[in-house]
Amino acid sequence: MDLKRTDLFRTKSYINGTWIEAKNKNTLAVNNPYNGAHLADVSDCGVNEVTEAIDAASDAFEIWKKYSAGKRAKILKKWHQLQMQHAEDLALILTTEQGKPLAEALGEIKYGASFVEWFAEEARRIYGDTIPGHASSIRIVTIKQPVGVVAAITPWNFPSAMITRKVAPALAAGCTVVIKPSELTPLSALALGVLAEEAGFPPGVINIVVSSDAPAIGETMCASPKVRKLSFTGSTRVGKILLKQSADTVKKVSLELGGNAPFIVFDDADIDEAVKGAIASKFRNAGQTCVCSNRLFVQDSIYDEFVQKYTEAVKQQSIGSGLDAGTVIGPMIEEKAVQFVESVVADATSKGAKLMSGGRRHEAKDGTLLYEPTVLCDVNTDMDVFKKEIFGPVAPVFKFSTEEEVIALANNTEYGLASYFYGRDYARIWRVAEALEYGMVGINTGMISTAVAPFGGIKQSGFGREGSKYGMDDYLEIKYMCWGGVK
């Protein structure tokens, strides 16, 4: 890996301001998903190390919470500047261990850094209130205070941005953090740790523990009374486990879980723009994002035209190594991910779906985890592609007739994260946007993620919001002060 700054490449965990090996000397291998090349052996920590990190964060909280908002903001802004300064190196690390195209990885680094900048500024805006009292001698005041130690468990699909999106508001609020990154992509997290140390965060404020034993680490975080907030991005199945485990200590929890996003195209939509939006929404990160369009619904009168144009556009998507110029779709993260995609495509075609493009692994010399971008038409609700989160480059296109029908289809899922639709009738736009049971709605756009807007879902996609002014709320407690005897 040809980095301009080689010290960003770390293989040890970061606890209490020190880079440490696992006490038992265990390591885990990190490999390039495109060609399987071995990248590094990273220290594989366990319960002892995460307990040490929690203790360090708890001690550091007593110091960090007393920093003025301006002082915390200054350090956060320095961290943001360092991320932007070294964005190309961070992107190269990300692509090499995760697989997404380099241009997309650079976009993630800048997107992730934008949260640090945003919340550095929000640190100064943690306002309380004065409330008219219930008696003439009473004065009521509320203030907001940091919740305490925050545990952040982050996924492999956005190994940089998912950290900054959780950690930046926590730090701005005055909390300290213990991060457990995915064992598949720990190098991006550790590189952020290098820059955090350089930015000037005191020891113990940011701790990064790499471990292959996710169940034990998660259980320890949930059981610890010192951890007052858990933020998790990942599967609904694991989120439910963590929520149950957090009950005994009654800690604050925010969960960003699975999705089954509908992408609706009405008959009055600009079809060419809808095709572009559907490409952007579906195939970013090889379809491995929780907000990817999972089910495309197209009104019957324009169905054939849309499928034709969409299929032609999908066939133009270049597939290969994320490090190669021009690559749009990189490898999937691991073998079992490809096997799952193969299974849902096989289920659909066995039940009558028509394969318009793709439907198989890409024939590449090195890229065994490359799966061709796939379009399925003539699909129905009995198929797995309707019910399951695909998490891969497969686009099933359903046909619908009426507004009422497509709203029912779109909402017929346990998930409620992201949704999208294209149309020009503004009365219908309002009706549909309000009727969709999702935390986020993209209207005539396939890209909705930004630091200035609240990101999160409803139903079994979780709760809590990341980004925007609302992103501070989960890291703060409201304290009510009642002043009596004012005469």
Image: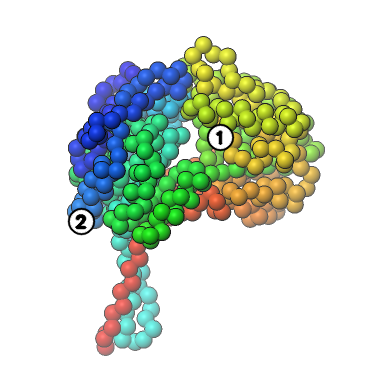
Q: Position of residue 303 (x, y in %)?
A: 76, 35
Q: Residue at x 68, y 23 (%)?
A: 357
Q: Which picture quadrant has residue 25?
A: top left
Q: From the image, which quarter does the N terminus lie in? A: top left
| Element type where label 2 sits in the image | helix
Q: Residues within 10 Å of mark 2 (few under 14, many from 20)?
A: some
Q: Amino acid at mark 2?
A: Glu
In the rendered view, tell whether residue 323 sits above or below residue 419.
Answer: above
Quadrant of image for the C terminus = bottom left
* Residue 380: assigned label: none
> Please, what is the three-letter code of the amino acid marked with disc 1?
Phe
Crowding at mark 1 (Cα within 10 Å: few <14, some 14-19, many 20+): many
Q: Is residue 280 left or right of residue 97?
A: right
In this image, 378 relative to 207: left or right?
A: right
Q: Secondary structure at mark 1?
A: loop
Residue that numbered label 1 is attached to = 391
Residue 113 coordinates in the image, percent (x, y): 37, 38
Q: Is residue 146 left or right of residue 448?
A: left
Residue 299, how many percent across, how many down? 76, 40
Q: Is residue 473 visible?
A: no
Image position, residue 316 (x, y; %): 62, 20
At x 36% / y 38%, what residue is drawn?
A: 213
Gap between marks 2 and 1 measured at Cα: 41 Å
Image point (26%, 23%), residue name: 6
> Circle 2 is placed at which residue position?
62
* Residue 329 in sight here: yes
As drawn, the residue found furthest toward the top would be: 365
Of callouts 2 and 1, the N-terminal one: 2
8 versus 422 height, above or below:
above
Please state the total of marks drawn on the protein image.
2
Residues 96 and 352: in front is 352
The residue at 30%/61% (across/down) is 145
